[in-house]
């Protein structure tokens, strides 16, 4: 705004913009987010270490300089073009109000659904938007109607707590036996495959398996397709928790070989908080009940499997911009960069005194996230003390994770705005904390 312009002319300009924005078709508005760096042209592996390119990407994020934040597993902050779009959509909704919502939101939400489906490699009729992975997975686990009393359901220690609760709740709800087993540590791909094979073998009544693609506890990337395939051969359906994977790991939903998957959009796709989706393979819709007997949509319409009520319109309307940025940087480049950042600190810290890295260096078994613990330090208090020391003495933010059978640990999660200098700070701090170096 020119300093001599009046407030009222500025307001008129904003209001005109909001009215025009509401009337433009959503798909046309959100195909590209302005201000993004040019897409890289090198192969993904070479891009991972392209300092100039990632410095451009880093500039897309406004993030506090008070701490090196390596706790980006909780959610993924919005890049600036996405945040601006979210503010614009929030203003539009507040201004247009139900006039927009009653006339246009239905078609716009459908455009969002189609955009997400295309990006994840599904048909639009195979996905329904939710408020996040929790809602998606609770609807899949709770709604799965192929269980009868006496059947078994199976999950592991690395699965997410609230999904474990939902599986446990099936005992009262469906009369099934619930079995939990431990993923071995260190979790190599073969050891994990063997553990799932053994668990399935030992529990022949199993009809439903919960499987987490990327563990929020250790960062381990499960060989989902192999396990789901193995389960299917025994007549077991698999529900995949992909809350952490899509956007961190480069894949399309079909590659998981699972019929039921819950996703987040507010972690590694970088959409505003409060949005995810569920996937049900087209020919398996009947295996999931309608959400609380929904009657808004037909039995054959996947949207009847999610009845959220009024949602934050702006959040949903911003999803295409987040997906556009994800695609502009590219899923393969993101994956390569995040793995490079993980390798950067792990390769330096691996030899430190008493440090145990919980996720192996095996190709395909990790993305951005990797957890560590110090030998013998398995309690909540031990790990919390280290997290606090890293944060308060070294200005490095991590998080303690519980629930791993062999003991608690500390999770380190870089993001696209992390650079090598940030990780040098972590490595330096770990050297002090482990007593590898005093200072
Ligand atoms: C593996 C896993 N599943 C499910 C969820 C739930 O996601 P949300 O809280 O975003 O719904 C999370 C969140 O961190 C997670 O890590």
Image: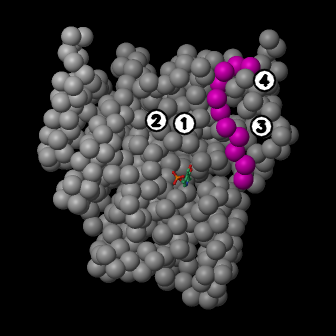
Badge 1 marks a residue whose secondary structure is loop
Res 351 quadrant in image: top right
Q: Quadrant of the C terminus?
A: top right
Of label 1 and label 2, which has the lower sequence position?
1
Of label 3 and label 1, which has the lower sequence position?
1
Q: Does the magenta-highlighted stretch encompass residue 114? A: no
- In the displayed structure image, the side of residue 159 where residue 436 appears, left or right: right
**Label 2 neighbour load within 10 Å: few <14, some 14-19, many 20+:** many
The image shows residue 65 at horizontal and vertical percentages of: 55, 19
Name the residue carrying label 3: 384
- In the displayed structure image, the side of residue 6 where residue 296 appears, left or right: right
**Label 3 neighbour load within 10 Å: few <14, some 14-19, many 20+:** some
Work out which residue is located at the far bottom of the displayed protein and give it. Answer: 149
Badge 2 marks a residue whose secondary structure is loop
- In the displayed structure image, the side of residue 384 where residue 174 appears, left or right: left
Identify the residue at image location x=64%, y=64%.
Answer: 164
Residue 72 is tagged as: 1
Identify the residue at image location x=66%, y=21%.
Answer: 395
Name the residue carrying label 2: 77
The image shows residue 416 at horizontal and vertical percentages of: 45, 29
The image shows residue 58 at horizontal and vertical percentages of: 42, 22
Whether disc 1's CB lies below 8 Å from ligand 1 is answered no
In three-dimensional space, the C-alpha distance between marks 3 and 1, rounded to whole angstroms, equals 18 Å
Name the residue carrying label 4: 433
- Tag 2 near tag 4, CB within 8 Å: no
**Label 1 neighbour load within 10 Å: few <14, some 14-19, many 20+:** many
State the extent of the magenta-drawn residues as a range: 393-403
Q: Nearer the viewer, residue 437 or 277?
A: 277
In three-dimensional space, the C-alpha distance between marks 2 and 4, rounded to whole angstroms, equals 28 Å
Query: Which mark's residue is nearer the viewer, 3 or 4?
Result: 3
């Amino acid at each position: 705004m020119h300093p001599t312009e009046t407030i009222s002319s500025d307001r008129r300009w904003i209001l005109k913009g909001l009215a025009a924005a509401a009337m433009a078709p959503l798909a046309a508005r959100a195909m590209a987010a302005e201000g993004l760096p040019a897409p890289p042209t090198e192969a993904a592996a070479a891009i991972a270490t392209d300092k100039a390119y990632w410095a451009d990407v880093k500039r897309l994020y406004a993030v506090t300089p008070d701490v090196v934040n390596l706790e980006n597993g909780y959610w993924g902050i919005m890049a600036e073009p996405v945040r601006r779009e979210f503010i614009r959509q929030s203003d539009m909704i507040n201004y247009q109000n139900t006039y927009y919502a009653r006339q246009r939101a239905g078609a716009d939400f459908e455009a969002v659904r189609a955009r997400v489906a295309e990006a994840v490699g599904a048909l639009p009729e195979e996905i329904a938007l939710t408020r996040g992975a929790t809602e998606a997975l609770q609807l899949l686990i709770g709604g799965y109607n192929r269980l009868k009393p006496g059947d078994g359901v199976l999950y592991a220690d690395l699965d997410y707590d609230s999904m474990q609760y939902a599986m446990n709740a099936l005992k009262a709800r469906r009369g099934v036996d619930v079995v939990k087993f431990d993923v071995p540590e260190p979790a190599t791909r073969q050891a994990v495959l063997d553990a799932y094979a053994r668990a399935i073998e030992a529990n022949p009544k199993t009809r439903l398996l919960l499987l987490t693609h990327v563990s929020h506890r250790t960062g381990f990337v499960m060989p989902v397709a192999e396990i789901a395939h193995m389960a299917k051969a025994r007549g077991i359906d698999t529900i995949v928790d992909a809350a952490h994977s899509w956007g961190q790991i480069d894949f399309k939903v079909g590659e998981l070989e699972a019929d039921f998957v819950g996703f987040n959009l507010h972690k590694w796709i970088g959409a505003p908080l409060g949005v995810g989706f569920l996937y049900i393979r087209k020919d398996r819709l009947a295996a999931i009940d309608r959400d609380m007997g929904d009657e808004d949509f037909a039995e054959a319409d996947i949207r009847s499997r999610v009845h959220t009520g009024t949602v934050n319109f702006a959040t949903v309307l911003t999803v295409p911009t987040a997906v556009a940025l994800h695609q502009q940087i590219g899923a393969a480049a993101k994956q390569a960069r995040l793995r490079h950042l993980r390798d950067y600190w792990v390769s330096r810290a691996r030899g430190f005194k008493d440090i145990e890295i919980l996720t192996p260096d095996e190709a395909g078994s990790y993305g951005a996230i990797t957890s560590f613990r110090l030998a013998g330090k398995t309690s909540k208090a031990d790990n919390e003390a280290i997290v606090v020391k890293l944060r308060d003495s070294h200005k490095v933010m991590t998080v303690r994770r519980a629930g791993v059978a062999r003991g608690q640990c500390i999770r380190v999660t870089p993001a696209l705005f992390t650079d090598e200098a940030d990780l040098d700070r972590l490595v330096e701090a770990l050297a002090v904390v482990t007593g590898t170096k005093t200072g």
